[in-house]
Amino acid sequence: MMKIKGGLISFNNFLSTSKDRDISYILADSNQVNPDLVGILFAMKVDPSQSTSPFASIADISKFQGEEEVLFSMHSVFRIQDIKQTGENNRLYEVNLTLTADNDPELSKLTDYIRQESSLDEEGWFRLGSVLFKMGQFDKAEDIYQVLLDQTKDNKDKADIYHQLGSIKDDQGKYQEALAFYEESLTIKQKTLPPNHPSLATSYNDIGLVQNNMGNYPESLSSHEKALEIRQQSLPSNHPDLAKSHNNIGLVNDSMGNYPDALLSHEIALEIRQQSLPLHHPHLASSYNNIGNVHYNIGNYPKALSSHEKALEIRQQSLPPNHPDLASSYNNIGAVYYNMGNYSKALSYYEKALEIQQQSLPLNHPDLAMSYNNIGEVYAKMGNYPKALSYYEKDLEINKQSLPPNHPDLAYSYNNIGEVHNSMGSYSKACPFYERAIQIGEQSLPSNHPNLQKWIKNLEHVKNK
């Protein structure tokens, strides 16, 4: 919270407050009993003549007489004016907030943009499905789109619905289903739209994302280049969709180990987004996140940490608290601390990520596998090999269920289990895991990819034991 001073904060439920500072202080101070928690006293300034957020005194009907309770409506938004420590042991903070009004420039810009982005050309149930999807409520969104698909005969609506169903399946990690929906949508669009229509670019873009998730990097790069070509012909040079194409080309190059090309693409995407998007838009967080990943991959950990912290700061202000993208930021920060040798901090961030993912994702989602893998790596570094093996096996089990048999992430899983057996002196057990990692890597990665070369060296090492 210290990093977002001057920014906005929203509460996702009805907010009960008290005009009695002493009562509020007691409640905040009580959190200090737990050494893992800090107490926060929110001091709120409200100008009734300016604020448009509903709030009311319920002192006369409150269950707790004497509290002078004031109730704020759901999603009230406040600006953080000041943060200061008040406790003797640095574990109690006072945060001064001011209730915003609809004419707050930053809030208006962000909400207007997101409203336009999620509702453009959409009405009724289409709009609700889009909003639910953006909130991460995938099952509810899918139910709505399936009903709409059964009811419509319009080709444009069918193409849009198939595309949205593809987006849902992609976010759930069901990549084959996602690809089928996207391709069905693309087929309809190719029959009904001009060849340089922006909607075709959207289809190629999202097909490329799924192909990247499946490890089909050359096909993914081709799809994203088709999307970029259409967008360059049909959109202004600073349009956010151009940023998407540059961003996604960067993702593929990152996956293929082409780090300089990846960094260049992500920096172009960030520059466009800074020109065209509100200050705290989630897509800005994605750019910082991806730049952080490239710096991480080339070993520039201070720059990686700075980028990932910027991404986390934006996501904390713009997304629900259990959104999978927050888990992604926690995982990435954990990875940086891991490589800087700060294993206790790494474990803390990884566990935050896993907690969110267990609440918001299917049990066999690849992102859960990645969190299990990350926690396993920390335990391996700390010398706790039985725990490391347990987490690596959870990672492998999910990846076998959810990924194609030659996906690179499966190779990483097999290699990591091999490394644990190697560290425990079980060289004969390590060999088949290294061999399987190499077999998959040779099918899915360039021959000069650094990880493939590493796995080959690992196998040579245990064979010489």
Image: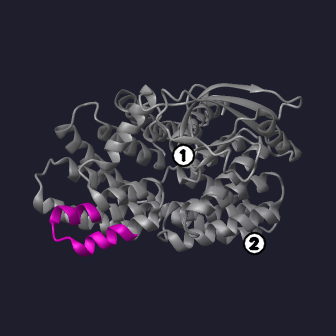
Residue 261 is covered by the magenta coloring: no
Task: Tell me the residue at 62%/72% (across/down).
Answer: 397
Q: Number of numbered discs present?
A: 2
**The image quarter in which residue 305 lies:** top right
Please state which of residues 64 and 10 is positioned toward the viewer in this rendering. Answer: 64
Q: Residues within 10 Å of mark 2 (few under 14, many from 20)?
A: some
Mark 1 secondary-structure assignment: loop
Residue 150 is covered by the magenta coloring: yes
* Residue ID for mark 2: 428
Q: What's the CA distance linking mark 1 and mark 2?
A: 62 Å
The magenta stretch is 143-161
Please state, as top left, top right, bottom left or bottom right, where the C terminus lies in the image: bottom right
> Is 27 located above or below residue 162 in the figure?
above
Q: Residues within 10 Å of mark 1 (few under 14, many from 20)?
A: some
Please state which of residues 248 and 149 is positioned toward the viewer in this rendering. Answer: 149
* Residue ID for mark 1: 73
Please state which of residues 364 and 31 is positioned toward the viewer in this rendering. Answer: 31
Q: Amino acid at mark 1?
A: Ser
Q: Please state the horizontal and vertical placement of residue 438, each as a whole percent of the image.
A: 57, 63
- Most extreme residue toward the front is 60
